[in-house]
Image (cartoon, grey):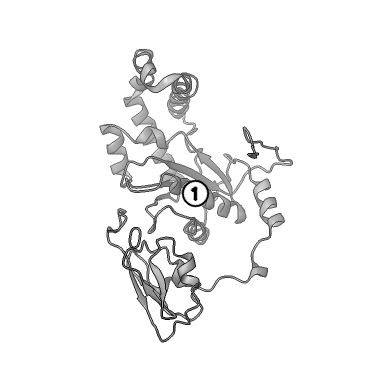
């Protein structure tokens, strides 16, 4: 038995070199599938793991003697790398300062984002934690202002074709099914959003993606942990910020391209492979504006249980 993803439905193979194994038991302690055990002072594969090896790589990464190899589920010993030295990583204050400087930027210079920077953003985003490996996150990259604008034009044309979704009669019919909060969001946010997107685009102003020189759409497959695309998008946003780019998350596109025949046609045109429970667009560009101060944010609540 193995946990399925869109990329593989087989469990990985655990290969143990008994000669190299020191019997320290570190690999056993980090395998949460209970797939490893110590037998006669050597590590061995158990007969009854929970699911079968999912290819997280923990055992291979923690082994100090190189006695364990994982093969399968898009993982192999070639994927191992030496961890950076602690002194080369950001400390808390450095990380916090980076996060504090980030604001949503929607004003960009007429300058493309270099391919080298795009590659670095993707490399950083790939380190995001995932629910079940291998990652089922997919990324659509629109790497020029023209591509970003064309997507926005197509998106607005699509919205025009489904304006019934925010019509008074449809919202009235659906209110008992989707509840008070959704009803309020449709009336006060989604319906005005349709008007803003479509109306501004007809006037030549792109308020969907703001004519950013780079946009990335992170989405999943039917097997994806819903959080995975959002975490990867967040990592990409932070990476972009560290590289001197302005960034902005756009939450108004993803939910509207998931259902119906017209949504499917739009996804197919842009090779968006699956409808996805969760997903997120992030735009990037060399910022045209610079903020002098930050704004203190808060959570709705922070409760420590007694």
What residue did someone put label 1 on? 231
Q: Quadrant of residue 18?
A: bottom left
Q: Quadrant of the N terminus?
A: bottom left
Report the front residue among 222 and 10.
Answer: 10
**Front residue (pair 144, 49):** 49
Which quadrant is the C terminus positioned in? top right
Query: Is 101 situated left or right of 39 in this image?
Result: right
Residue at the bottom extreme of this rendering? 19
Q: Residue 47 at x, y = what percent?
A: 31, 67
Is residue 112 among the parts visible in the rendering? Answer: no
Tell which of 100 and 86 is nearer to you.
86
* In-front residue for pair 241/80: 80
Residue 295 x, y percent position in the rendering: 70, 37
Q: Secondary structure at mark 1?
A: helix
- Above or below residue 94? Residue 279 is above
| Residue 130 against residue 147 in the figure, above or below | below
Q: Residue furthest front?
A: 40
Residue 259 locus on image (x, y percent): 31, 33
The outermost residue toward the right is: 292
Residue 11 lies, in percent from the top left, at 30, 63
Question: Which residue is farthest left?
Answer: 261
x 37%, y 67%: residue: 75
- Give the residue at x 35% y 69%: 46
């Amino acid at each position: 038995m193995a946990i399925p993803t869109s990329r593989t439905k087989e469990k990985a193979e655990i290969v143990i070199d008994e000669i190299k194994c020191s019997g320290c038991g570190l690999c056993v302690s980090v395998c949460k599938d209970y797939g490893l055990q110590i037998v006669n002072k050597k590590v061995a594969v158990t007969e009854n793991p929970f699911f079968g090896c999912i290819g997280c790589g923990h055992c291979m990464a923690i082994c100090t003697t190189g006695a364990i190899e994982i093969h399968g589920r898009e993982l192999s010993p070639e994927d191992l790398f030496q961890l950076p030295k602690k002194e080369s990583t950001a400390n808390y204050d450095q990380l916090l300062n980076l996060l504090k400087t980030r604001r949503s930027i929607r004003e960009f210079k007429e300058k493309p984002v270099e391919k080298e920077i795009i590659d670095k953003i993707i490399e950083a985003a790939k380190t995001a934690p995932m629910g079940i490996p291998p990652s089922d996150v997919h990324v659509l990259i629109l790497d020029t202002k023209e591509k970003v604008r064309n997507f926005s034009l197509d998106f607005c044309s699509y919205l025009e074709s489904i304006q019934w979704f925010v019509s008074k009669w449809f919202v009235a019919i659906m209110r008992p099914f989707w509840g008070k909060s959704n009803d309020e969001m449709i009336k006060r946010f989604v319906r005005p959003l349709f008007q803003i997107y479509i109306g501004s685009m007809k006037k030549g102003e792109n308020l969907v993606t703001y004519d950013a020189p780079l946009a990335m759409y992170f989405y999943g497959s039917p097997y994806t942990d819903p959080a995975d695309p959002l975490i990867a998008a967040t990592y990409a946003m932070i990476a972009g910020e560290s590289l001197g780019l302005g960034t902005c998350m756009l939450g108004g596109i993803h939910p509207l391209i998931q259902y119906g025949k017209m949504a499917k046609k739009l996804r197919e045109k842009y090779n968006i492979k699956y409808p996805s429970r969760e997903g997120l667009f992030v735009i990037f560009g060399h910022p045209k504006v610079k903020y002098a101060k930050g704004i203190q944010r808060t959570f709705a609540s922070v409760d420590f249980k007694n």
